[in-house]
Amino acid sequence: MGHLSTAIESMTAPILLGYIVAGLLLQLAIGITIGVWRRHTDSSALGSVKFESPQASPAAWVGWREFSIVSREFEDESHTQCSFYLAPVDGAPLPPYEPGQFLTFSVQPAAAERPIIRCYSLSDRPVPGTYRITVKRNPGSAAKAQLPEGACSSYFHDELHEGDVVKVKAPSGHFCIDANSSIPVVLIAGGIGITPMMSMLQWSLAERPEHEIHLYYGLRDGSQHAFKRRLDELASANPRFHLNVVYSRPGVNDLQGRDYQYVGHMDVDLLRRTLPHGQHQFYVCGPSAMMESLVPELARWGVPQDNIHYEAFGPSSMRAASFESEKHHPSPTAPIEVKFRRSGRALAWDGHDESLLAFAERHGVAVESGCRSGSCGTCETKLVSGAVSYAHQPDHDVAVGHCLMCVAKPESTLVLEV
């Protein structure tokens, strides 16, 4: 002890300070080494787990793109509704779409002088690699010779098979389910109006299974009951999905409680009796008779306009879409001059035509058209001067300085490029 105390006493203050600093530096170096070793060990323990930034979804394409028919499948007993599964010929990734949107097709049956353009709703939730549409055969109408109704649906049913190729535009349309809303959803479908509802329904059950969703599906009888097995499976597997099928004229083999729940037609009285009290988001798509009665009934029932969404495919459905706006767009008190610059025609609009397209056709002015409901954009025309109005916002995004003749009406003297 005497020698140790003598040695300590002989040390100067600077030497003691040096020993202390050296010790601290040694502890710091040991700590860094242990930290690096632990980080390496933790990284090795992760094995094949990868942390990657999310990749951007493939962008929608511009113009026409070729798709092949991968398979086709009838969805009802009467074989009037057929689903077509489509894959891109180029093999590139498909952009996702909003449940409820549609595809625009350009086809040319052998008997057609020029391509026919039609829009068909996507009938499945977004999945990688393929799209699905469901087409109902339309018998057409001899009263509308200028509009070849049924020609496109018959072409799909009779002439398109696996391996055949069609031209398709990217998914489009504003009739989409609100992915951010927590309000219970009510889907109301009549006939082939079930197609966008199948997309909305299956997406909702997959992505938001905790949300309540009601489907009211009206049709004539069991022979036209599309997606029956699939709907029954979904209803059995999802307690928050409430399926309500309405037959207007049940067949002899249709059994209430098994095939359908109610007899009659889709109306607000049925909704009053069967929907739980509270706020709902309503999505409606069906034939013109249903649309023209049910959409205004919902408004009169007190449903806020922002909670009523409806599909407006086809000229007949446009009358339902304009049930409110017609009050604000009465027929003009004096004729409005409409000039077609390229055709060299100047005509008087008297308000009796449902659209500028119908007006032009009635007077023999040739205009390329397709869906006739503001969806495909085929009749988009440069608006040289003047102003037009729409009964509702078109699904097609109209370019600045242009108009869609199939859903537009003049508000002032017009000069159109056609």
Image (spheres, rainbow, N blue to C red):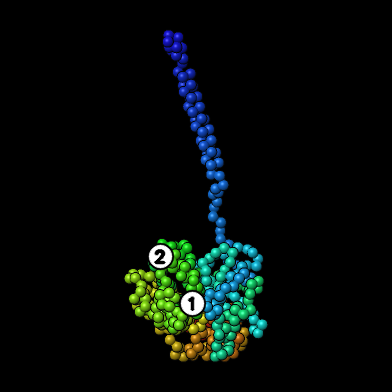
Query: Which residue has dot 1 on it?
Result: 225
Please tell me whether residue 31 is drawn above or below residue 8 in the rendered image.
below
Left or right of residue 17: residue 164: right
**Secondary structure of the residue carrying numbered label 2:** loop
For the question of whether residue 4 can be seen, the reply is yes
Q: CA distance from mark 1 to mark 2?
A: 22 Å
Query: Which residue has dot 2 on it?
Result: 239
Among the 4 quarters of the image, the one containing residue 127: bottom right
Residue in the picture at 52% in, 40% down: 42
Q: Quadrant of the N terminus?
A: top left
Q: Quadrant of the C terminus?
A: bottom right
Please tell me whether residue 413 is drawn above or below residue 76 in the rendered image.
below
Residue 342 appears at what percent x and percent y? 62, 84
Residue in the picture at 50% in, 27% down: 26
- Amino acid under disc 2: Pro
Left or right of residue 380: residue 411: left
Residue 332's tag is none
Among the 4 quarters of the image, the one containing residue 238: bottom left
